[in-house]
Image (spheres, coloured by chain):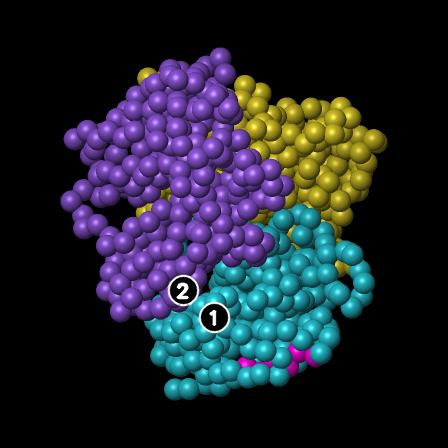
Chain colours: A cyan, B yellow, C purple
Amino acid sequence: MFRAFAYQLMTEGFAAAAGPAAIPGPTLECEVGDVLRVHVRNGLPDKYAQAITMHPHGVRYTPEYDGAYMGDFTRAGGYIGPGEEFTYTWEAIPESAGAWPYHDHGPNHTLNSMRGLFGAIIIHPKDAPRPDVERVLFLHSLAPPTTGLKRVFQCINGCAYAGNTPTIEAKVGQNVALHVFGIDDAFHDFHMHGHRWHKDGGNFVSDNQTVGPAETITVRFKEDNPGRWLYHCHVMSHQDNGMAGFYLVTP
Amino acid sequence: MFRAFAYQLMTEGFAAAAGPAAIPGPTLECEVGDVLRVHVRNGLPDKYAQAITMHPHGVRYTPEYDGAYMGDFTRAGGYIGPGEEFTYTWEAIPESAGAWPYHDHGPNHTLNSMRGLFGAIIIHPKDAPRPDVERVLFLHSLAPPTTGLKRVFQCINGCAYAGNTPTIEAKVGQNVALHVFGIDDAFHDFHMHGHRWHKDGGNFVSDNQTVGPAETITVRFKEDNPGRWLYHCHVMSHQDNGMAGFYLVTP
Amino acid sequence: MFRAFAYQLMTEGFAAAAGPAAIPGPTLECEVGDVLRVHVRNGLPDKYAQAITMHPHGVRYTPEYDGAYMGDFTRAGGYIGPGEEFTYTWEAIPESAGAWPYHDHGPNHTLNSMRGLFGAIIIHPKDAPRPDVERVLFLHSLAPPTTGLKRVFQCINGCAYAGNTPTIEAKVGQNVALHVFGIDDAFHDFHMHGHRWHKDGGNFVSDNQTVGPAETITVRFKEDNPGRWLYHCHVMSHQDNGMAGFYLVTP
């Protein structure tokens, strides 16, 4: 089965210009066995005009669809100039099951990732039941260029401080899956109050897990503890500078 | 079964005032199935007077006993003012087996954690044999405020440099368990000379393991190698600035 | 079976003087059950004359062969002065199977590690098939002292930027094993384009894995995807400052 997604929303709504609502880009969701065709248009406004790409993690692709700028060795999808378009083809193989980031990997990838040019790919096992509540949370720093602020905020999905960051809601009895990504220069440490999970789906139980740049951790549990909870990065200066949010559980 | 612990020792002996002997706070030790009642009195001296809390990892608790300051949403146990008391109730469920940190999560949690307001909870499986040697090691930075020193020491349990940090002793044939916690802004990497262990209790063998803020790793082995050994954080500047200790094994 | 290795190549060719070809030192390769005898001569040129040692990870050794400078408690192999020699004896026990770093652990270990005084020990399971392609990749920073440059390059095996760093070659159908080590103050995050692997040999699939100082991750896969690929540290500033390389797969 083929699925098509539009990346243009993200580039048109480029975070620095459009505000935090555009961070992260659209979540691409599919099933093992699917082939993704992803139509990308570089819709960056003139002010930010530059080449971009879309590099995926986890999926299988040939070098043509790698989306990586490589200087003299750059392939077609590794340089999408202002106003240009490209269609990537990616395959969700059995080992792709899980959640993965995609992000700009063009000549200016660091700055663009700092501006929010990233998003998630969720690949469900074939014919498996889906979680009742499933959210993606990107941990990243952001110095909003339009504000002239020098301060670097520690953000979740483009926003800082609980109430601005995503407030996640669930009910007792629901299966919850939170896909947490690092997407800057720093290592983060995801903590959820009042809950624990099996780290990497194994035997070790954790309530606080390291997540490096472009890594994913998935926090899965069956909800059993109603109330208002905090989730946050446990790197203390990150928490203090905004990397925290609310999780609301109703009975 | 109920167990009661006094946190006041720690706050009365608040590290910055009382010296490193007060870091970490008392270890809370129990068994799966136990319910912990923890009586906390904020005994901070006037010089450091401020609200504190006690937020646990790993155990199960209702929001009332979360011990987290949340601004307008703060519950009773999330703000214990100077001279005030509070009793937390926490449950050691099967998934709580292991070792976990507790720490201040009040309005000034970062500074207080830097001053040493943290400790360990060890939860043994029900009716399981205990290790012969079991120690908790907190990896954290400390700039002693009473000394006026600018230098940040890299500490283990409030002290810097082998000989000052805990010297651990064991005999050949003993089962050893070392619970190692990160508890500052940094990521650490725990290395023990002359020994190896199964990372997170799985199949992968390591002698050097990453531990992030408020994470725990547990190093378990049966002792078989007598002599004087070093253990240290393998982040080189941390080791150089004091994050190392001795481990003495007798035949 | 005994195997002998000469460490002198590395110290004589000490990175700062000899250039990146001497980084890392020689790879020590053996099998579980082997005993390694490692003959070390401190051949540092006068300009860099100082005591060095060779401290191994993963293998079993008595304190005499620990290779760690410990001040008043230093043993014979913990201080090899300029022009001196020492022979270490290390044992590859079943739990040693895998890849491990060795490095200077003398009185000046941090600076020397920054200069490249490290290498790999690969210990194969007994009578097991070997990978068709096996490489060691050390992730570390380097400020070449002979150049007078202030800039810190982010290196792989002593070199910075794809084309200078190791270009790895493989063919479709080959079994590939890449042993990746951190060996400085930083945490790194190893990403390979177009491929994925089972983290720590378990069930969790990753294409991007954290590796701390003196930690090892091993990336294993059966090659099935021809083309020119990038591998790099996903800490963005590390990638920008050189920590990237090419992987070439032919059909």
Name the foreground residue: A226 vs C54.
C54
Q: Residues within 10 Å of mark 1 (few under 14, many from 20)?
A: some
- Residue A113 visible in this rendered orientation of the protein: no
Horizontal and vertical percent for residue B198?
A: 36, 42
Relative side of A65 to A250, left or right: left
Q: Residues within 10 Å of mark 2 (few under 14, many from 20)?
A: many
Pointer 2 indicates a residue of which chain? C
Asked if C15 appears above or below A103 in the picture, the reply is: above
Asked if A206 appears above or below B142 in the picture, the reply is: below
Q: Is residue A42 magenta?
A: yes
Horizontal and vertical percent for residue A196?
A: 52, 55
Q: Secondary structure at mark 2?
A: strand
Give, as a single range, the part of the protein colored magenta.
Answer: A40-45
Which residue of the protein is positioned furthest toward the right in this rendering? B46
Q: Which residue is mark 1?
A: A74
Horizontal and vertical percent for residue B92?
A: 51, 47
Q: Which residue is mark 2?
A: C229
Relative side of A46 to C7, left or right: right
Name the foreground residue: C54 vs B209.
C54
Q: Residue at x 80, y 60 (%)?
A: A149
